[in-house]
Each structure stands twice: as structure tokens, then as C-alpha cells.
Image (tube, helix red, strand yellow):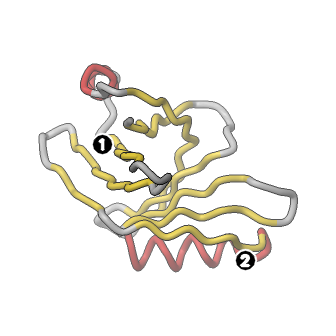
Amino acid sequence: MYKIYKTVNRKTNICGYWLDNNGILYKDNIIIEKSYNPNNIIKNLFKKNEIAVFVVKEKKHLFGKVERKAIIIYKNGKKHYLNNRTEKIVNKKELKKQIVTHCKKFGGVTVYENGKKTVKLEIWS
């Protein structure tokens, strides 16, 4: 199963933050589309002028363990593989600081709204 992180022009409960090569911080509202064959979805996103697409591959093992790997696929064909995933629950009061810290260290972070006072961060490296 693949999860394709798609940017949308409306507010969602998932946001991706990332730094470009010039140190500028960007925010994308995200929806996740699940697919067993993501190639057509990715091609269509590039046709809609996406610069890069973030994809997570999930493989469920016999006794419930889930193996996850991520890849950033760029429109120019380059790929960046990410194998280490960290999840962290943080207080919303600390969110801005956490976003800046993780973006500087890892290049990006995904924020999931999961409560009134806390959010879940997903960091890939």
C-alpha cells in the first residue's frame, strides 16, 4: 500500500512544512490518497505542476508489524529516499518552535491535528 501526500488549496487537518534550498519555510495543506499502484496518481500531480511528490510505502507483516519507507519524487526524475520515521506528540504552544527545529534539521515535517492542545509530528530522515 502506498500513501501519496497531495497538496490541496483548502484547510485540512494535515500540514506539511518544508524548507527550500534558500531557507524559505513553506506550508502545504495535505490530503493522503491510498493506492496499490501510485504511478498514475504521481504522473497526474506532475501534470498539475507539482514540483515534488511525497510517497510512503507501507508493508504489513504477518504479526502486525508495519514497515514504512518514504520517497520524495521530483518532477525532474530525481528521488530522495527516507527510511527513518519518528513520531512525536507536542503541545500546540510549542508547535512553531518544533516546526522550525525539525525543518532545519531534517528539511521538513508533517503535522497532524489530533486534539485541542496537542498535535502529532511525523519526521522522516
Q: Is residue 58 left or right of residue 32?
A: left
**Regarding mark 1 in the picture, which secondary structure is present there?**
strand
Using the image as rendered, state which of residue 58 and residue 25 is in the foreground. Answer: 58
- Residue 91 x/y as whole percent: 77, 73
- Residue 73 x/y as whole percent: 24, 44
**Regarding mark 2 in the picture, which secondary structure is present there?**
helix
**Residue, disc 2:** 94
Residue count near mark 1 (Cα–Cα under 10 Å), binned few <14, some 14–19, many ≥20 = some
Q: Are marks 1 and 2 in contact (CB under 8 Å)?
A: no
Q: Which mark is residue 52?
A: 1
Which kind of residue does numbered mark 1 sit on? Ala
- Residue 66 x/y as whole percent: 44, 54
Which kind of residue does numbered mark 2 sit on? Glu
Using the image as rendered, state which of residue 65 and residue 111 is in the foreground. Answer: 65
Q: Is residue 24 above or below residue 94?
A: above
Q: Is residue 67 left or right of residue 96?
A: left
Dividing the picture into quarters, in which one does residue 4 lie?
top left
Furthest residue toward front: 63
